[in-house]
Amino acid sequence: MLNKETNIWPRNEKGELLPQEVQVPDLKDSIRILPITWGAWKELITQSKESGLDDVKILSKYCVEPKFTEEEAKLLKAKTGDAITKAILRASGLLPEVGDPLAAAKETS
C-alpha cells in the first residue's frame, strides 16, 4: 500500500517545505532548494502555456542557497542557470535523473 508520508515533501511545524541539498552535476557543486510540489508545478505549467517556462521564477523561488533575486537570476551565465534549473526539476521528480538511460531521449524530444 502506498505510504502517504513518504510521498509528500517534508515540512516544518509551520507547514513550510524543508530545503533539500542537491548536487548540480554540470557544475560539480551542490545547492539547497525547495522542491517544486505537484500543485506548484501545475501552476507553472499553466502560466508557461502563455509565456513559456519561466526559469528565472524557478531559480529565484526554489533555489534557496545560494539565493538569487529575479534580477540576479537574469544575470546568471546560461550554463549555470540551466544547470541549476535542471537540478531543481530533477530533485523535484520532474525530470529524469542524470544517468537514466531514457533521460537523453526525454530531454531532446
Image (cartoon, grey):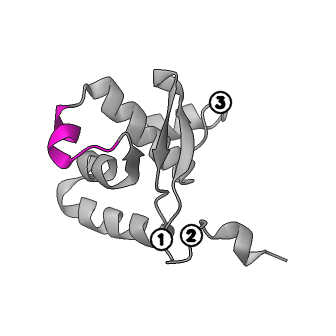
What whole-number distance in Å separates the C-alpha atoms at marks 3 and 2? 29 Å
Pick whichever, 44 or 61, lies toward us.
61
- Label 3 or label 1, whichever lies nearer to me, is 1
The boundaries of the magenta stretch are 67-75
Quadrant containing the C terminus is top left
Q: Amino acid at mark 3?
A: Gly
Classify residue 9 as left or right of residue 32: right
The label number, if any, that marks residue 99 in the structure image:
3
C-beta proximity under 8 Å, tags 2 and 1: yes
Mark before the other along the chain sequence, 2 or 1: 2
Magenta: predominant secondary structure element? helix
Question: Outermost residue toward the right?
Answer: 1
C-beta proximity under 8 Å, tags 3 and 2: no
Vertical side of 23 occupied by 49: above or below: below
Vertical side of 35 occupied by 37: above or below: below
Q: Position of residue 6 (x, y in %)?
A: 73, 67
Q: Position of residue 100 (x, y in %)?
A: 66, 35
Q: Residue at x 32, y 34 (%)?
A: 81
Mark 2 highlights which residue?
Answer: 11
Q: Position of residue 65 (x, y in %)?
A: 41, 43
